Amino acid sequence: MDCLDSPGACTTLGGLAPTPEMLCGYGNPSVCAHRLLTIHAHPDDESSKGGGSIARYAAAGIGTVLVCCTGGEAGSILNPALDHPHVKARLPEVRRTELVAATRHLGYQRVWMLGYRDSNMPASGEPGTFAAAPLDETVRALVRLIRTERPHVVVTYSDNQRGYQHPDHLRVHEASVLAYAAAGDPAFHPELGTAWAPQKLYYTVWSRARLMAQHEAFVRLGRQSPFKPERWQRRPSMDHRLTTRIFVGDHWEQVQEALRAHATQIDPQSPYWFGLPPEVARATYPYDDYILAQSAVPAPLPEDDLFAGIVADAVQHGTWRTGP
Ligand SMILES: [Zn+2]
């Protein structure tokens, strides 16, 4: 029995493994010939890291699936207008509602909650939190979802997160890389579904170029920049490793709406997020940046498309055959 349909049947993942939950769905990514699956740590990460790419690919008819590993329960309320005890008391529920709204703006077709609790920073170590869970348990949970959704492209966090070392973000990288490799191995826990090998694995990256472009736009306008270049310059730049730049300028409004939907986390008055006039902000750096970490298909670099070289499925009357 598939435990995605029957929550009580998840014993194959181990006694403490949470059951993935389909938070929302707007369509069926399975019928799309190209499919993209992203793995994020908390609600709001999907909007701030590569959200424009989702909007672009969803608009192009590509199946889009999010796996959100935690509910973001440990997050603070970063919007003073909502920083009230009654909001704080309902924060897990509020963040789910925000995630539903944000992913709708971006065009995600399906959203899975992997079922772990936010680990906090530094990690609380409490049972049920993501970073405290056994790594192999999380890998199996991700393998099950990869085999269910059968993405051609998987996006996760990078192997160098020295700029922001949230334990949940570090664990997302660690577990995703292992699950990406294991999903296609028929010998790896066959009870988790038929083996499926995605063709490309990407790391989503906030490039130095992006941060500096935003900073310089503030300076050009004579406004105080919320970006501190000296701080960014102390962090390791990974721009030399970037392989893939996706133009997302046609989907800027959708990303803004998605960010605003995370109202407890993203202050609508924040100069960091919304300090530039819209006409400046949308043109300042209209790209999402990625590192192609693994590819099973020829992929000449640099690229401007996550699906460059991907061999799509052909959909015929609800059945599948492989081949271009
Ligand atoms: Zn996060």
Image: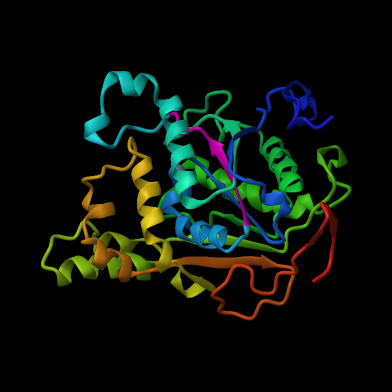
Q: Please say whether residue 90 is visible from this viewpoint.
A: yes
Q: Position of residue 175 (x, y in %)?
A: 64, 46
Q: Quadrant of the N terminus?
A: top right
- Tell whether position 68 is magenta: yes
- Tell whether position 61 is magenta: no
Name the residue at the front extreme: 317
Q: Which residue is drawn at 33% across and 23% down?
A: 87
Q: Quadrant of the C terminus?
A: bottom right
Q: Which residue is drawn at 76% across and 47% down?
A: 147
Name the residue at the left extreme: 222
Q: Which residue is drawn at 76% across and 25% down?
A: 6
Colour scheme in use? rainbow
Which of the 4 image quarters holds residue 305? Answer: bottom right
Q: Please say whether residue 120 is visible from this viewpoint.
A: no
In this view of the protein, which residue sits in the foreground, 21 or 60? 60
Q: Position of residue 158 (x, y in %)?
A: 54, 57
Image side of residue 127 versus residue 84, left or right: right
Range of residues picked out in magenta: 63-73
Please state the total of marks drawn on the protein image: 0
Q: Position of residue 179 (x, y in %)?
A: 71, 48
Q: Is residue 114 above or below residue 151?
A: above
Image side of residue 206 versus residue 143, left or right: left
Q: In this view, does 217 lie above or below 265?
A: below
Location of ligand 1 given as a quarter of the image: top left
Which of the 4 image quarters holds residue 129? Answer: top right
Q: Position of residue 280 (x, y in %)?
A: 24, 67
Q: Is the magenta stretch mostly helix, strand or loop?
A: strand
In this view of the protein, which residue sits in the foreground, 25 or 285? 25
Q: In this view, does 285 lie above or below 169?
A: below
